[in-house]
Amino acid sequence: MILGILVMNALSFGLDQAGYFNVSADGTSHPVDWVIGVITMVFFDQKMMALFSLLFGVGVVIFAERAASKGRRSVGLSLWRFALLGMVGLVHISFWDGDVLLLYALCAPVVLLVRRLPALLLGCVGVALALVGAIVAPLFQSAAGGTPDGLQGFWFIGYDGFSAAADGWFIVNAASRALGLMLLGVALYRTGIVQGHRDDAF
């Protein structure tokens, strides 16, 4: 899974910014480039990130439960871990804008706070949050327009950065999707699915 994330990060390391989102924008001078581009988009793009987010939510709950079972202050220890993760994320984001550690550190306390809610509620809220980016995308796209400083930097080489509206969508999408999948992971853990406790019929 982590190596799967590396596959996608390698695109952003080796290609122009637009090449990450639009394979034809960069790095497609050879047929093999197309094969690699299609494989990464179909089998890796956002899939590994989704799994990572699911398991991160599970990890938050497992750590808190194990700390509590040992008589330790699970909330305090968890918050300390999130703070450390956030500090690492702050350092990392100063080098690379693709960092997710800071985002995860900000989402984790929410997961910790709601971890005991009913699994069905967590699952429903998680799915809804994961879909927020897709639902609001037309609004942000309309606000960004088609100017060179709007969405063209998303698809074509030669444009620096995105418009404020496009940047806003990326933030909303990343945050809602990460938190939503974490909550979905907690729901799957609470129902025994992650642990494989359900019977074969299920």
Image (cartoon, rainbow, N blue to C red):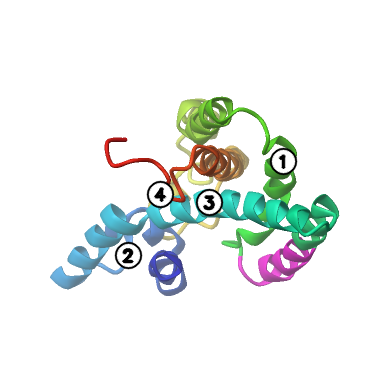
Q: Residues within 10 Å of mark 2 (few under 14, many from 20)?
A: many
Q: Which amino acid type is shown beneath numbered disc 2?
A: Asp
What residue span does the magenta drawing correspond to?
A: 84-96
In the picture of the structure, the residue carrying the numbered disc 1 is 110
Q: How many marks?
A: 4
- Give the position of the N terminus as an image quadrant: bottom left
Name the residue at the left extreme: 31
Q: Secondary structure at mark 4?
A: loop
Instruction: Point out residue 16 in the picture as x, y percentages from the top left corner.
Output: 42, 66
Q: Which amino acid type is shown beneath numbered disc 4?
A: Gly
Instruction: Point out residue 98 in the picture as x, y percentages from the top left corner.
Output: 57, 61
Can residue 156 be seen?
no
Sequence-wise first label, 4 or 3: 3
The circle drawn on residue 26 is 2
Instruction: Point out residue 77 in the picture as x, y percentages from the top left corner.
Output: 81, 59
Does the magenta segment cover residue 93?
A: yes
Does the magenta segment cover residue 185?
A: no
How far apart, in angstroms, are the residues tagged by discs 2 and 1? Answer: 39 Å
In the picture of the structure, the residue carrying the numbered disc 4 is 196
Sequence-wise first label, 2 or 3: 2
Sequence-wise first label, 2 or 4: 2
Q: Secondary structure at mark 3?
A: helix
In the picture of the structure, the residue carrying the numbered disc 3 is 53
